[in-house]
């Protein structure tokens, strides 16, 4: 039976819902994939076209693992424009200041949305005593007490085992640890924020550690266009399609730099700093380039 756009009835209903939505998401991403967008533009598509269409369902039916992985795969294929991933997924999800690209973690957002919905019905004063309150409270009460989120109710019965449908809640907290007692309002946004606060800043292999913060700030500077931000970020990440990277993935016949008299391995660092040609360019351009940068990072990588 379909109620307000969602299928109900039996164990197959959950899969039926997610199968339909996943197909729709892939179709949408396929259409958007035909355009040449920056990563920032693609993030917007993921938020508006993918997440917005799934959040409603995610609050009713927890997304099964097989579908969340399928959606995640489709999202990253869309971000990279191919099956070849050049940066770890966990790094892509990090904030710009931490060296990430703020790519929405769709699977985590969907699960957080379901979990928060369940907890909210049990602990939010707006729902206490309403008809939405008693069923989740019956099943979740012992778990809520264990987590320090709510005491056991005094005059109503509780269940000591979780139905499979609600075991997702327990699983979510096992795999994603954060300070759940500090959450005042149970929304997916607050939970994701609490999880993101635990992220640490990524380093850049070929730069000293104390400059890394400036590198990520500059790579996402509002003075740059989105394309330039992508270029700077990919360069710092060592994820530009340079020959060493392509060679490692059978995309180039040699990892060597094509410049005459240069026999170095063409990595991002070589291309921008260590190659003889790059050094010549730096010598000529250094003054101009550094004048355009904040003084805090007036340094050449060479
Ligand atoms: Zn070279």
Image (cartoon, rainbow, N blue to C red):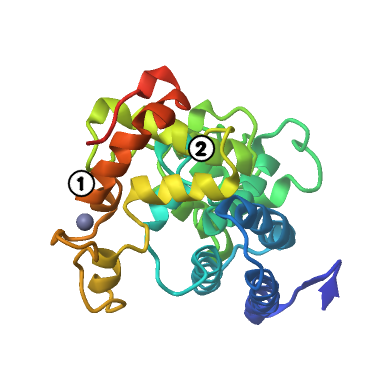
On screen, residue 184 above or below 112 = above
- What is the C-alpha distance between the residues marked 1 and 2? 24 Å
Question: Which badge, 1 or 2, is on the more N-terminal residue?
Answer: 2
Res. 59 in view: yes
- Look at the numbered disc 2 and say if its residue's Cβ is closer than 8 Å to ligand 1: no
Q: In this view, does 24 lie to the left or right of 228?
A: right
The residue that mark 2 highlights is 220
Q: Is residue 5 left or right of residue 211?
A: right
Q: In which quarter of the image is residue 67?
A: bottom right
- Look at the numbered disc 1 and say if its residue's Cβ is closer than 8 Å to ligand 1: yes
The residue that mark 1 highlights is 274
Q: Quadrant of residue 49?
A: bottom right
Dot 2 surroundings within 10 Å: few (below 14), some, or many (20 or more)?
A: many
**The one of 253 and 133 positioned closer to us in this rendering:** 253
Which one is closest to the eye, mark 1 or mark 2? 1
Residue 154 location (% of width, % of height): 62, 34
Considering every residue shown, the one lying at the far top of the view is 295
**The one of 190 and 80 positioned closer to us in this rendering:** 80
Tag shown at residue 206: none
């Amino acid at each position: 039976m379909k109620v307000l756009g969602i299928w109900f009835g039996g164990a197959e209903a959950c899969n039926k819902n997610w199968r339909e939505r996943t197909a729709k998401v892939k179709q949408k991403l396929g259409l958007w994939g035909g355009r040449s967008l920056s990563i920032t533009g693609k993030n917007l598509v993921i938020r508006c076209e993918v997440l917005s269409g799934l959040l409603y369902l995610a609050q009713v039916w927890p997304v099964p693992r097989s579908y969340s992985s399928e959606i995640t795969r489709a999202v990253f294929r869309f971000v990279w424009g191919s099956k070849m991933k050049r940066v770890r997924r966990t790094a892509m999800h990090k904030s710009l200041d931490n060296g990430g690209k703020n790519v929405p973690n769709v699977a985590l957002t969907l699960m957080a949305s379901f979990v928060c919905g369940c907890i909210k019905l049990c602990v939010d004063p707006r729902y206490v005593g309403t008809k939405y309150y008693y069923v989740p409270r019956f099943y979740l009460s012992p778990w809520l007490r264990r987590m320090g989120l709510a005491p056991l109710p005094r005059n109503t019965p509780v269940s000591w085992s979780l139905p499979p449908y609600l075991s997702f809640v327990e699983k979510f907290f096992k795999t994603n640890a954060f300070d759940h007692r500090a959450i005042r309002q149970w929304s997916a946004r607050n939970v994701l924020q609490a999880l993101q606060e635990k992220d640490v800043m990524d380093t850049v292999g070929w730069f000293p550690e104390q400059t890394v913060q400036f590198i990520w700030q500059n790579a996402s500077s509002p003075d740059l266009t989105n394309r330039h931000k992508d270029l700077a970020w990919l360069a710092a990440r060592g994820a530009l399609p340079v020959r060493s990277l392509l060679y490692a993935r059978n995309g180039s016949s040699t990892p060597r730099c094509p410049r005459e008299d240069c026999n170095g391995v063409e990595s991002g660092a070589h291309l921008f700093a260590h190659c003889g040609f790059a050094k010549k360019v730096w010598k000529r351009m250094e003054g101009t380039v550094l004048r355009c940068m904040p003084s805090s990072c007036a340094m050449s990588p060479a």
